[in-house]
Amino acid sequence: MSELPHTAFSLRRVGALTSNTLRELTRLRVFYVLLLFALLLIGSSFFLARMTFQQEFQVLKDISLGAINILTSVLAIVATARLLPQEIEDRTIYTILAKPVHRGEYMLGKLAGVLLLLAITTLLMSALFLAVLYVREHTVLAETARQMRAAPPDHLEEALRNVRASAFNLNLLPGIAIIFLKAALLAALTLFVSTFATSNIFAVVVMVFVYFIGHLEGTAREYWQQEHGTGWIASTFLGLVALLFPDLQLFNLVDDVVAGTPILPALFAKTAALGGFYVTLYFLLAWAVFYRREL
Amino acid sequence: MIRGLLILSILLVTGLAKIPVEAAISAEHRREHFRAVEFGLGLREQVGQLGFIAALSGFRALVADFVFIQAHVAWERTEWGRVLLLFRQVTTLQPRAILFWDMAAWHMAWNASVAAMNDPAQPRLALRLRAQREYFDLGRDFLERGIRNNPEKPQLYEALGRLYRDKYHDHAHAAEYFEQAAALPDAPSYDRRFAAYELSYCAGREQEAYERLHRLYQSGERERLPTLLKRLKFLEEQLHVPLAERIPDQLPADTPKR
Protein backbone atom coordinates (compact mmCIF):
# COMPACT_ATOMS: atom_id res chain seq x y z
CA MET A 1 0.00 0.00 0.00
CA SER A 2 1.54 3.29 -1.08
CA GLU A 3 1.43 6.19 1.34
CA LEU A 4 0.76 9.77 0.28
CA PRO A 5 3.75 12.07 0.83
CA HIS A 6 3.34 14.42 3.80
CA THR A 7 2.63 17.96 2.61
CA ALA A 8 2.98 21.23 4.54
CA PHE A 9 -0.71 21.96 4.12
CA SER A 10 -3.43 19.46 3.44
CA LEU A 11 -7.10 20.25 2.82
CA ARG A 12 -7.88 16.64 3.76
CA ARG A 13 -6.44 17.09 7.24
CA VAL A 14 -8.24 20.43 7.65
CA GLY A 15 -11.45 18.77 6.43
CA ALA A 16 -11.06 15.96 8.97
CA LEU A 17 -10.52 18.49 11.78
CA THR A 18 -13.50 20.53 10.56
CA SER A 19 -15.88 17.57 10.56
CA ASN A 20 -14.55 16.43 13.91
CA THR A 21 -15.10 19.90 15.42
CA LEU A 22 -18.59 20.06 13.96
CA ARG A 23 -19.45 16.61 15.32
CA GLU A 24 -18.08 17.54 18.73
CA LEU A 25 -20.12 20.77 18.85
CA THR A 26 -23.23 18.96 17.68
CA ARG A 27 -22.84 16.51 20.54
CA LEU A 28 -23.00 19.50 22.88
CA ARG A 29 -26.59 19.89 21.70
CA VAL A 30 -26.02 23.40 20.43
CA PHE A 31 -28.93 22.85 18.07
CA TYR A 32 -31.17 23.39 21.09
CA VAL A 33 -30.94 27.06 20.09
CA LEU A 34 -33.22 26.13 17.20
CA LEU A 35 -35.79 24.89 19.65
CA LEU A 36 -35.46 28.17 21.53
CA PHE A 37 -35.93 30.03 18.26
CA ALA A 38 -39.03 28.01 17.37
CA LEU A 39 -40.49 28.61 20.84
CA LEU A 40 -39.87 32.33 20.45
CA LEU A 41 -41.67 32.36 17.09
CA ILE A 42 -44.63 30.40 18.48
CA GLY A 43 -44.76 32.49 21.66
CA SER A 44 -44.68 35.80 19.84
CA SER A 45 -47.36 34.63 17.38
CA PHE A 46 -49.92 34.58 20.23
CA PHE A 47 -49.43 38.29 20.67
CA LEU A 48 -49.07 39.03 16.96
CA ALA A 49 -52.55 37.61 16.33
CA ARG A 50 -53.95 40.76 17.98
CA MET A 51 -52.33 43.05 15.44
CA THR A 52 -52.99 44.13 11.86
CA PHE A 53 -51.03 42.30 9.15
CA GLN A 54 -48.51 45.14 8.66
CA GLN A 55 -47.77 45.22 12.39
CA GLU A 56 -47.67 41.45 12.53
CA PHE A 57 -45.16 41.12 9.68
CA GLN A 58 -42.98 43.96 10.95
CA VAL A 59 -42.81 42.53 14.50
CA LEU A 60 -42.42 38.95 13.24
CA LYS A 61 -39.46 39.95 11.05
CA ASP A 62 -37.87 42.08 13.78
CA ILE A 63 -38.21 39.36 16.43
CA SER A 64 -37.02 36.57 14.11
CA LEU A 65 -34.04 38.43 12.71
CA GLY A 66 -33.17 39.83 16.14
CA ALA A 67 -33.28 36.29 17.54
CA ILE A 68 -31.12 34.94 14.68
CA ASN A 69 -28.68 37.78 15.36
CA ILE A 70 -28.43 37.19 19.11
CA LEU A 71 -28.41 33.38 18.92
CA THR A 72 -25.70 33.21 16.23
CA SER A 73 -23.58 35.77 18.10
CA VAL A 74 -23.90 33.88 21.40
CA LEU A 75 -23.26 30.55 19.67
CA ALA A 76 -20.19 31.95 17.88
CA ILE A 77 -18.67 33.16 21.16
CA VAL A 78 -19.63 30.24 23.43
CA ALA A 79 -18.83 27.46 20.94
CA THR A 80 -15.45 28.91 19.94
CA ALA A 81 -14.39 29.93 23.44
CA ARG A 82 -14.42 26.33 24.69
CA LEU A 83 -12.50 24.80 21.77
CA LEU A 84 -8.86 25.40 22.70
CA PRO A 85 -9.02 25.63 26.53
CA GLN A 86 -11.21 22.52 26.69
CA GLU A 87 -8.95 20.49 24.40
CA ILE A 88 -5.92 21.54 26.44
CA GLU A 89 -7.69 20.65 29.68
CA ASP A 90 -8.87 17.28 28.31
CA ARG A 91 -5.41 16.76 26.78
CA THR A 92 -6.94 15.68 23.49
CA ILE A 93 -4.94 18.38 21.74
CA TYR A 94 -1.69 16.42 22.39
CA THR A 95 -2.94 13.35 20.54
CA ILE A 96 -3.81 15.52 17.53
CA LEU A 97 -0.65 17.63 17.47
CA ALA A 98 1.50 14.54 18.07
CA LYS A 99 0.43 13.46 14.58
CA PRO A 100 1.85 15.24 11.53
CA VAL A 101 -0.73 18.03 11.77
CA HIS A 102 0.44 21.63 11.64
CA ARG A 103 -0.87 24.04 14.20
CA GLY A 104 -2.15 26.26 11.41
CA GLU A 105 -4.18 23.37 10.00
CA TYR A 106 -5.46 22.61 13.46
CA MET A 107 -6.60 26.20 13.97
CA LEU A 108 -8.13 26.40 10.50
CA GLY A 109 -10.01 23.14 11.03
CA LYS A 110 -11.37 24.38 14.36
CA LEU A 111 -12.49 27.74 12.91
CA ALA A 112 -14.00 26.09 9.82
CA GLY A 113 -15.92 23.68 12.06
CA VAL A 114 -17.44 26.56 14.03
CA LEU A 115 -18.21 28.52 10.84
CA LEU A 116 -19.93 25.45 9.39
CA LEU A 117 -21.97 25.09 12.55
CA LEU A 118 -22.93 28.77 12.38
CA ALA A 119 -23.86 28.45 8.70
CA ILE A 120 -26.08 25.42 9.37
CA THR A 121 -27.73 27.10 12.35
CA THR A 122 -28.30 30.35 10.44
CA LEU A 123 -29.74 28.43 7.47
CA LEU A 124 -32.09 26.36 9.62
CA MET A 125 -33.32 29.38 11.61
CA SER A 126 -33.78 31.39 8.39
CA ALA A 127 -35.69 28.52 6.76
CA LEU A 128 -37.98 28.28 9.79
CA PHE A 129 -38.54 32.04 9.82
CA LEU A 130 -39.19 32.22 6.06
CA ALA A 131 -41.60 29.27 6.24
CA VAL A 132 -43.63 31.00 8.99
CA LEU A 133 -43.58 34.26 7.01
CA TYR A 134 -44.67 32.45 3.83
CA VAL A 135 -47.58 30.71 5.54
CA ARG A 136 -48.76 33.91 7.23
CA GLU A 137 -48.41 35.91 3.99
CA HIS A 138 -50.62 33.46 2.09
CA THR A 139 -53.20 33.34 4.86
CA VAL A 140 -53.40 37.15 4.95
CA LEU A 141 -53.57 37.35 1.13
CA ALA A 142 -56.52 34.95 1.08
CA GLU A 143 -58.25 36.84 3.92
CA THR A 144 -57.71 40.21 2.19
CA ALA A 145 -59.03 38.92 -1.14
CA ARG A 146 -62.12 37.55 0.63
CA GLN A 147 -62.75 40.75 2.62
CA MET A 148 -62.32 43.03 -0.40
CA ARG A 149 -64.38 41.08 -2.92
CA ALA A 150 -66.69 44.07 -3.44
CA ALA A 151 -63.93 46.71 -3.62
CA PRO A 152 -62.75 48.31 -6.91
CA PRO A 153 -60.06 46.19 -8.62
CA ASP A 154 -57.28 48.76 -8.15
CA HIS A 155 -58.05 49.00 -4.41
CA LEU A 156 -57.90 45.22 -4.11
CA GLU A 157 -54.72 45.11 -6.18
CA GLU A 158 -53.18 47.80 -3.98
CA ALA A 159 -54.20 45.97 -0.79
CA LEU A 160 -52.68 42.70 -2.04
CA ARG A 161 -49.54 44.55 -3.12
CA ASN A 162 -49.31 46.04 0.39
CA VAL A 163 -49.58 42.58 1.96
CA ARG A 164 -46.84 41.19 -0.31
CA ALA A 165 -44.61 44.23 0.31
CA SER A 166 -45.05 43.90 4.10
CA ALA A 167 -44.13 40.21 4.12
CA PHE A 168 -41.14 38.71 2.31
CA ASN A 169 -38.72 40.78 0.30
CA LEU A 170 -35.43 39.75 -1.23
CA ASN A 171 -33.48 42.25 0.88
CA LEU A 172 -33.94 39.99 3.87
CA LEU A 173 -31.42 37.55 2.34
CA PRO A 174 -28.38 39.89 2.27
CA GLY A 175 -29.49 41.03 5.74
CA ILE A 176 -29.28 37.42 7.00
CA ALA A 177 -25.93 36.96 5.21
CA ILE A 178 -24.57 39.98 7.12
CA ILE A 179 -25.80 38.48 10.42
CA PHE A 180 -23.77 35.36 9.56
CA LEU A 181 -20.73 37.51 8.73
CA LYS A 182 -20.94 39.19 12.12
CA ALA A 183 -21.11 35.79 13.82
CA ALA A 184 -18.12 34.60 11.75
CA LEU A 185 -16.15 37.69 12.81
CA LEU A 186 -17.01 37.04 16.46
CA ALA A 187 -15.97 33.37 16.10
CA ALA A 188 -12.58 34.32 14.60
CA LEU A 189 -12.02 36.96 17.28
CA THR A 190 -12.98 34.49 20.02
CA LEU A 191 -10.53 31.97 18.58
CA PHE A 192 -7.81 34.63 18.78
CA VAL A 193 -8.75 35.49 22.40
CA SER A 194 -8.85 31.79 23.34
CA THR A 195 -5.25 31.30 22.17
CA PHE A 196 -4.03 33.28 25.18
CA ALA A 197 -7.02 32.63 27.49
CA THR A 198 -6.50 30.31 30.43
CA SER A 199 -10.11 29.12 30.53
CA ASN A 200 -13.21 29.27 28.38
CA ILE A 201 -14.97 31.48 30.95
CA PHE A 202 -12.18 34.04 30.60
CA ALA A 203 -12.58 33.99 26.81
CA VAL A 204 -16.36 34.39 27.04
CA VAL A 205 -16.09 37.30 29.51
CA VAL A 206 -13.49 39.06 27.34
CA MET A 207 -15.69 38.56 24.28
CA VAL A 208 -18.77 39.99 26.02
CA PHE A 209 -16.77 43.16 26.69
CA VAL A 210 -15.42 43.14 23.13
CA TYR A 211 -18.98 42.77 21.85
CA PHE A 212 -20.16 45.89 23.66
CA ILE A 213 -17.02 47.90 22.89
CA GLY A 214 -17.26 46.81 19.22
CA HIS A 215 -20.73 48.32 19.04
CA LEU A 216 -19.37 51.59 20.45
CA GLU A 217 -16.28 51.61 18.22
CA GLY A 218 -18.00 53.72 15.54
CA THR A 219 -18.90 56.42 18.07
CA ALA A 220 -15.39 56.34 19.55
CA ARG A 221 -13.85 56.61 16.06
CA GLU A 222 -16.00 59.58 15.11
CA TYR A 223 -15.19 61.45 18.35
CA TRP A 224 -11.51 60.64 17.95
CA GLN A 225 -11.42 61.83 14.34
CA GLN A 226 -13.40 64.98 15.03
CA GLU A 227 -11.18 65.93 18.01
CA HIS A 228 -13.86 67.44 20.24
CA GLY A 229 -11.29 69.17 22.44
CA THR A 230 -11.04 66.18 24.78
CA GLY A 231 -7.92 65.79 26.88
CA TRP A 232 -5.05 63.60 25.68
CA ILE A 233 -6.01 60.72 28.00
CA ALA A 234 -9.55 60.55 26.59
CA SER A 235 -8.23 61.06 23.07
CA THR A 236 -5.68 58.22 23.46
CA PHE A 237 -8.34 55.94 24.92
CA LEU A 238 -10.76 56.66 22.05
CA GLY A 239 -7.95 56.16 19.54
CA LEU A 240 -7.02 52.78 21.03
CA VAL A 241 -10.67 51.66 20.99
CA ALA A 242 -10.97 52.74 17.36
CA LEU A 243 -7.73 51.03 16.37
CA LEU A 244 -8.00 47.76 18.27
CA PHE A 245 -11.70 46.84 17.98
CA PRO A 246 -13.86 46.07 14.96
CA ASP A 247 -16.86 48.30 14.27
CA LEU A 248 -19.69 45.84 14.87
CA GLN A 249 -22.37 48.45 14.11
CA LEU A 250 -21.39 48.12 10.44
CA PHE A 251 -22.91 44.62 10.55
CA ASN A 252 -26.23 45.74 12.07
CA LEU A 253 -28.13 46.47 8.88
CA VAL A 254 -31.03 44.16 9.37
CA ASP A 255 -33.07 46.60 11.53
CA ASP A 256 -33.30 49.00 8.61
CA VAL A 257 -33.78 46.21 6.07
CA VAL A 258 -36.98 45.20 7.88
CA ALA A 259 -38.08 48.85 7.80
CA GLY A 260 -37.75 48.74 3.99
CA THR A 261 -34.25 50.08 3.29
CA PRO A 262 -32.59 47.97 0.57
CA ILE A 263 -28.96 46.83 0.81
CA LEU A 264 -27.35 47.84 -2.47
CA PRO A 265 -25.02 45.20 -3.99
CA ALA A 266 -21.96 47.49 -3.73
CA LEU A 267 -22.62 48.13 -0.04
CA PHE A 268 -23.18 44.44 0.60
CA ALA A 269 -19.91 43.62 -1.20
CA LYS A 270 -17.96 46.17 0.88
CA THR A 271 -19.48 44.94 4.15
CA ALA A 272 -18.78 41.32 3.16
CA ALA A 273 -15.19 42.22 2.22
CA LEU A 274 -14.71 43.96 5.59
CA GLY A 275 -16.11 40.91 7.38
CA GLY A 276 -13.80 38.64 5.38
CA PHE A 277 -10.83 40.89 6.22
CA TYR A 278 -11.56 40.68 9.94
CA VAL A 279 -12.03 36.90 9.91
CA THR A 280 -8.69 36.49 8.07
CA LEU A 281 -6.87 38.97 10.32
CA TYR A 282 -8.06 37.40 13.57
CA PHE A 283 -7.38 33.90 12.29
CA LEU A 284 -3.80 34.86 11.32
CA LEU A 285 -3.25 36.50 14.71
CA ALA A 286 -4.64 33.41 16.47
CA TRP A 287 -2.29 31.27 14.43
CA ALA A 288 0.66 33.54 15.23
CA VAL A 289 -0.01 33.28 18.98
CA PHE A 290 -0.75 29.56 18.93
CA TYR A 291 2.22 28.74 16.69
CA ARG A 292 4.78 29.04 19.47
CA ARG A 293 2.54 28.51 22.45
CA GLU A 294 3.91 26.08 25.07
CA LEU A 295 1.36 23.35 25.58
CA MET B 1 6.46 39.32 25.67
CA ILE B 2 8.04 40.26 22.32
CA ARG B 3 5.36 38.23 20.52
CA GLY B 4 2.66 40.04 22.48
CA LEU B 5 4.08 43.44 21.50
CA LEU B 6 4.36 42.28 17.91
CA ILE B 7 0.70 41.19 17.85
CA LEU B 8 -0.33 44.52 19.43
CA SER B 9 1.62 46.48 16.83
CA ILE B 10 0.04 44.43 14.01
CA LEU B 11 -3.40 45.24 15.47
CA LEU B 12 -2.51 48.95 15.66
CA VAL B 13 -1.12 49.06 12.10
CA THR B 14 -4.12 47.19 10.64
CA GLY B 15 -6.30 49.45 12.82
CA LEU B 16 -4.80 52.50 11.11
CA ALA B 17 -5.52 50.91 7.73
CA LYS B 18 -9.09 49.88 8.56
CA ILE B 19 -10.23 53.19 10.09
CA PRO B 20 -10.69 55.06 6.77
CA VAL B 21 -12.44 51.99 5.29
CA GLU B 22 -14.83 51.74 8.25
CA ALA B 23 -15.45 55.49 8.17
CA ALA B 24 -16.23 55.32 4.43
CA ILE B 25 -18.65 52.37 4.84
CA SER B 26 -20.26 54.11 7.82
CA ALA B 27 -20.76 57.28 5.72
CA GLU B 28 -22.26 55.14 2.93
CA HIS B 29 -24.65 53.57 5.43
CA ARG B 30 -25.88 57.02 6.43
CA ARG B 31 -26.30 58.03 2.78
CA GLU B 32 -28.33 54.89 2.16
CA HIS B 33 -30.49 55.63 5.25
CA PHE B 34 -29.00 52.91 7.45
CA ARG B 35 -28.43 53.56 11.15
CA ALA B 36 -30.25 56.88 11.08
CA VAL B 37 -30.53 56.88 14.88
CA GLU B 38 -28.28 59.12 16.94
CA PHE B 39 -27.30 57.39 20.17
CA GLY B 40 -27.33 60.47 22.36
CA LEU B 41 -28.55 61.43 25.80
CA GLY B 42 -32.00 62.19 24.39
CA LEU B 43 -32.47 58.58 23.32
CA ARG B 44 -31.03 57.35 26.64
CA GLU B 45 -33.63 59.40 28.55
CA GLN B 46 -36.43 58.16 26.34
CA VAL B 47 -35.81 54.41 26.33
CA GLY B 48 -34.17 53.91 29.72
CA GLN B 49 -30.77 52.43 30.48
CA LEU B 50 -31.51 48.82 29.57
CA GLY B 51 -33.26 49.77 26.36
CA PHE B 52 -30.38 52.07 25.46
CA ILE B 53 -27.80 49.32 26.00
CA ALA B 54 -29.86 46.84 23.99
CA ALA B 55 -30.30 49.38 21.19
CA LEU B 56 -26.56 50.07 21.22
CA SER B 57 -25.80 46.34 21.03
CA GLY B 58 -27.55 45.88 17.72
CA PHE B 59 -31.06 45.13 18.97
CA ARG B 60 -32.64 48.50 18.17
CA ALA B 61 -35.51 46.96 16.20
CA LEU B 62 -36.26 44.50 19.00
CA VAL B 63 -36.36 47.30 21.58
CA ALA B 64 -38.60 49.32 19.23
CA ASP B 65 -40.96 46.34 18.87
CA PHE B 66 -41.05 45.80 22.61
CA VAL B 67 -41.98 49.46 23.14
CA PHE B 68 -44.49 49.21 20.27
CA ILE B 69 -46.18 46.26 21.97
CA GLN B 70 -46.36 48.33 25.18
CA ALA B 71 -47.93 51.15 23.15
CA HIS B 72 -50.44 48.68 21.70
CA VAL B 73 -51.41 47.57 25.21
CA ALA B 74 -51.65 51.23 26.34
CA TRP B 75 -53.97 51.89 23.38
CA GLU B 76 -56.20 48.96 24.38
CA ARG B 77 -56.42 50.56 27.83
CA THR B 78 -56.99 54.00 26.24
CA GLU B 79 -54.04 55.52 28.15
CA TRP B 80 -53.47 58.24 25.56
CA GLY B 81 -50.63 60.06 27.30
CA ARG B 82 -48.69 56.82 27.54
CA VAL B 83 -49.48 55.94 23.92
CA LEU B 84 -47.99 59.28 22.85
CA LEU B 85 -44.86 58.83 24.99
CA LEU B 86 -44.27 55.26 23.81
CA PHE B 87 -44.80 56.08 20.14
CA ARG B 88 -42.27 58.91 20.45
CA GLN B 89 -39.78 56.29 21.69
CA VAL B 90 -40.68 53.82 18.93
CA THR B 91 -40.29 56.37 16.15
CA THR B 92 -37.01 57.60 17.62
CA LEU B 93 -35.66 54.04 17.64
CA GLN B 94 -36.97 53.07 14.20
CA PRO B 95 -37.32 56.28 12.16
CA ARG B 96 -37.28 54.34 8.88
CA ALA B 97 -40.29 52.18 9.69
CA ILE B 98 -43.27 53.82 7.95
CA LEU B 99 -45.71 51.70 9.92
CA PHE B 100 -44.73 53.21 13.27
CA TRP B 101 -45.16 56.83 12.09
CA ASP B 102 -48.47 55.97 10.47
CA MET B 103 -49.77 54.11 13.54
CA ALA B 104 -48.65 56.90 15.89
CA ALA B 105 -50.44 59.53 13.79
CA TRP B 106 -53.56 57.36 13.51
CA HIS B 107 -53.75 56.81 17.28
CA MET B 108 -53.37 60.53 17.95
CA ALA B 109 -55.51 62.08 15.22
CA TRP B 110 -58.24 59.45 15.02
CA ASN B 111 -58.48 57.54 18.30
CA ALA B 112 -57.20 59.93 20.98
CA SER B 113 -58.94 62.92 19.38
CA VAL B 114 -62.32 61.14 19.42
CA ALA B 115 -61.74 60.06 23.01
CA ALA B 116 -60.92 63.69 23.94
CA MET B 117 -64.07 64.94 22.23
CA ASN B 118 -66.21 62.41 24.11
CA ASP B 119 -64.44 62.85 27.43
CA PRO B 120 -67.15 62.61 30.11
CA ALA B 121 -64.81 64.18 32.67
CA GLN B 122 -64.70 67.45 30.70
CA PRO B 123 -68.11 69.16 30.57
CA ARG B 124 -66.90 72.26 28.65
CA LEU B 125 -67.18 71.83 24.90
CA ALA B 126 -64.55 74.50 24.17
CA LEU B 127 -61.94 72.59 26.16
CA ARG B 128 -62.91 69.29 24.55
CA LEU B 129 -62.57 70.89 21.13
CA ARG B 130 -59.19 72.28 22.07
CA ALA B 131 -58.01 68.86 23.28
CA GLN B 132 -59.28 67.29 20.06
CA ARG B 133 -57.40 69.88 18.01
CA GLU B 134 -54.22 69.22 19.98
CA TYR B 135 -54.44 65.52 19.14
CA PHE B 136 -54.90 66.36 15.44
CA ASP B 137 -51.74 68.47 15.68
CA LEU B 138 -49.86 65.63 17.38
CA GLY B 139 -50.89 63.29 14.56
CA ARG B 140 -49.76 65.82 11.97
CA ASP B 141 -46.45 66.29 13.79
CA PHE B 142 -45.77 62.52 13.66
CA LEU B 143 -46.51 62.43 9.93
CA GLU B 144 -44.40 65.50 9.15
CA ARG B 145 -41.44 64.08 11.06
CA GLY B 146 -42.01 60.71 9.41
CA ILE B 147 -41.86 62.39 5.99
CA ARG B 148 -38.62 64.17 6.91
CA ASN B 149 -37.12 60.77 7.77
CA ASN B 150 -38.61 58.96 4.75
CA PRO B 151 -39.00 61.53 1.99
CA GLU B 152 -38.98 58.92 -0.79
CA LYS B 153 -41.95 56.85 0.40
CA PRO B 154 -45.51 57.81 -0.62
CA GLN B 155 -47.44 56.27 2.32
CA LEU B 156 -46.89 59.09 4.82
CA TYR B 157 -47.73 61.85 2.31
CA GLU B 158 -50.95 59.95 1.64
CA ALA B 159 -51.66 59.63 5.37
CA LEU B 160 -51.07 63.38 5.82
CA GLY B 161 -53.45 64.05 2.91
CA ARG B 162 -56.10 61.92 4.64
CA LEU B 163 -55.51 63.77 7.92
CA TYR B 164 -56.02 67.17 6.26
CA ARG B 165 -59.07 65.86 4.42
CA ASP B 166 -60.86 64.04 7.23
CA LYS B 167 -59.81 65.93 10.33
CA TYR B 168 -58.90 69.50 9.37
CA HIS B 169 -61.25 69.54 6.34
CA ASP B 170 -58.47 71.48 4.60
CA HIS B 171 -58.90 70.34 1.00
CA ALA B 172 -56.10 72.48 -0.45
CA HIS B 173 -53.49 70.90 1.81
CA ALA B 174 -55.02 67.45 1.34
CA ALA B 175 -54.76 67.85 -2.46
CA GLU B 176 -51.17 69.01 -2.12
CA TYR B 177 -50.11 65.92 -0.11
CA PHE B 178 -52.02 63.45 -2.28
CA GLU B 179 -50.30 65.05 -5.26
CA GLN B 180 -46.87 64.69 -3.62
CA ALA B 181 -47.62 61.02 -2.85
CA ALA B 182 -48.74 60.41 -6.45
CA ALA B 183 -45.48 61.86 -7.79
CA LEU B 184 -43.36 59.27 -5.95
CA PRO B 185 -42.42 55.84 -7.28
CA ASP B 186 -44.62 52.95 -6.01
CA ALA B 187 -47.52 55.30 -5.21
CA PRO B 188 -50.95 53.67 -5.61
CA SER B 189 -52.89 54.81 -8.70
CA TYR B 190 -55.71 56.31 -6.61
CA ASP B 191 -53.48 59.06 -5.14
CA ARG B 192 -53.79 61.07 -8.38
CA ARG B 193 -57.56 60.67 -8.23
CA PHE B 194 -57.71 61.65 -4.56
CA ALA B 195 -55.64 64.79 -5.27
CA ALA B 196 -58.08 65.82 -8.02
CA TYR B 197 -61.14 65.10 -5.82
CA GLU B 198 -59.76 67.29 -3.05
CA LEU B 199 -58.95 70.06 -5.47
CA SER B 200 -62.55 69.99 -6.68
CA TYR B 201 -63.65 71.10 -3.19
CA CYS B 202 -61.30 74.14 -3.17
CA ALA B 203 -63.10 77.38 -3.90
CA GLY B 204 -61.43 79.26 -6.74
CA ARG B 205 -59.61 76.21 -8.14
CA GLU B 206 -62.56 74.63 -9.93
CA GLN B 207 -61.08 75.04 -13.40
CA GLU B 208 -57.82 73.35 -12.40
CA ALA B 209 -59.77 70.53 -10.73
CA TYR B 210 -62.02 70.12 -13.75
CA GLU B 211 -59.03 69.82 -16.10
CA ARG B 212 -57.39 67.19 -13.90
CA LEU B 213 -60.54 65.16 -13.46
CA HIS B 214 -61.24 65.35 -17.17
CA ARG B 215 -57.74 64.14 -17.97
CA LEU B 216 -58.27 61.20 -15.61
CA TYR B 217 -61.66 60.51 -17.19
CA GLN B 218 -60.11 60.45 -20.65
CA SER B 219 -57.25 58.20 -19.56
CA GLY B 220 -59.56 55.16 -19.63
CA GLU B 221 -62.45 53.20 -18.19
CA ARG B 222 -60.39 52.24 -15.17
CA GLU B 223 -60.48 55.78 -13.81
CA ARG B 224 -64.21 56.33 -14.38
CA LEU B 225 -65.29 55.60 -10.84
CA PRO B 226 -68.57 56.91 -9.33
CA THR B 227 -66.89 59.64 -7.23
CA LEU B 228 -64.91 60.89 -10.21
CA LEU B 229 -68.03 61.03 -12.38
CA LYS B 230 -69.97 62.79 -9.63
CA ARG B 231 -67.28 65.43 -9.04
CA LEU B 232 -66.86 65.95 -12.76
CA LYS B 233 -70.62 66.46 -13.21
CA PHE B 234 -70.62 68.90 -10.30
CA LEU B 235 -67.78 70.94 -11.81
CA GLU B 236 -69.40 70.95 -15.25
CA GLU B 237 -72.39 72.62 -13.65
CA GLN B 238 -70.27 75.02 -11.64
CA LEU B 239 -68.13 76.06 -14.64
CA HIS B 240 -71.05 76.13 -17.09
CA VAL B 241 -69.27 73.75 -19.46
CA PRO B 242 -71.05 73.66 -22.88
CA LEU B 243 -73.36 70.65 -23.18
CA ALA B 244 -71.42 69.25 -26.14
CA GLU B 245 -68.24 69.07 -24.05
CA ARG B 246 -69.83 67.37 -21.03
CA ILE B 247 -69.39 63.72 -20.25
CA PRO B 248 -72.41 61.51 -20.96
CA ASP B 249 -75.07 61.35 -18.24
CA GLN B 250 -75.52 57.63 -18.53
CA LEU B 251 -72.64 55.43 -17.58
CA PRO B 252 -71.34 53.47 -20.58
CA ALA B 253 -72.44 49.84 -20.53
CA ASP B 254 -68.92 48.57 -19.85
CA THR B 255 -68.30 50.88 -16.88
CA PRO B 256 -67.77 48.75 -13.81
CA LYS B 257 -70.61 49.13 -11.30
CA ARG B 258 -69.08 49.98 -7.91
Image: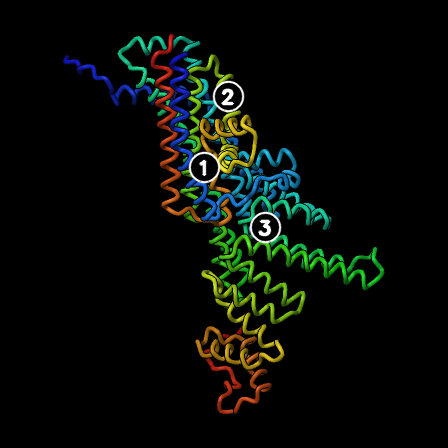
Residue furthest bottom as drawn: B243
Return the x and y of residue B209 as percentages of the image width and height. Answer: 54, 78
- Res. A69 in view: no
Q: Position of residue A147 (x, y in %)?
A: 55, 60
Is the residue under label 2 in contact with that under label 3 (CB below 8 Å)? no
Q: Nearer the N terminus, badge 2 or badge 1?
A: 2
Disc 3 marks which amino acid? Phe
Q: Which mark is residue A251?
A: 1
Q: What SS does tag 3 mark?
A: helix
Whether labels 2 and 1 share one chain: yes
- Name the amino acid, label 1: Phe
Secondary structure type for disc 2: helix
Residue named by callout 3: B100
Q: Are marks 1 and 3 in contact (CB under 8 Å)?
A: no
Whether marks 1 and 3 lie on the same chain: no
Q: Amino acid at mark 2?
A: Val
Closer to us: A1 or B69: B69
Is the residue marked by circle 2 packed among few (<14), some (14-19), or many (20+) residues within 10 Å? Answer: some
Q: Is residue B257 left or right of residue A170?
A: right
Q: Is residue A145 above or below residue A221?
A: below
- What residue sits right under mark 2 in the picture? A206
Q: CA distance from mark 3 to mark 2?
A: 37 Å
State the residue at coordinates (52%, 68%): B179
Q: Position of residue B177 (x, y in %)?
A: 56, 65
Q: Crowding near pointer 1: few (<14 within 10 Å), some, many (20+)?
A: many
Q: What x and y, as percent, mark residue A157?
A: 47, 62
- What residue is at 40 percent from the left and 42 percent from the top? A174
Mark 3 against mark 2, which lies toward the viewer? 2
Disc 3 crowd rating (10 Å Cα; few below 14, some 14-19, many 20+) is many
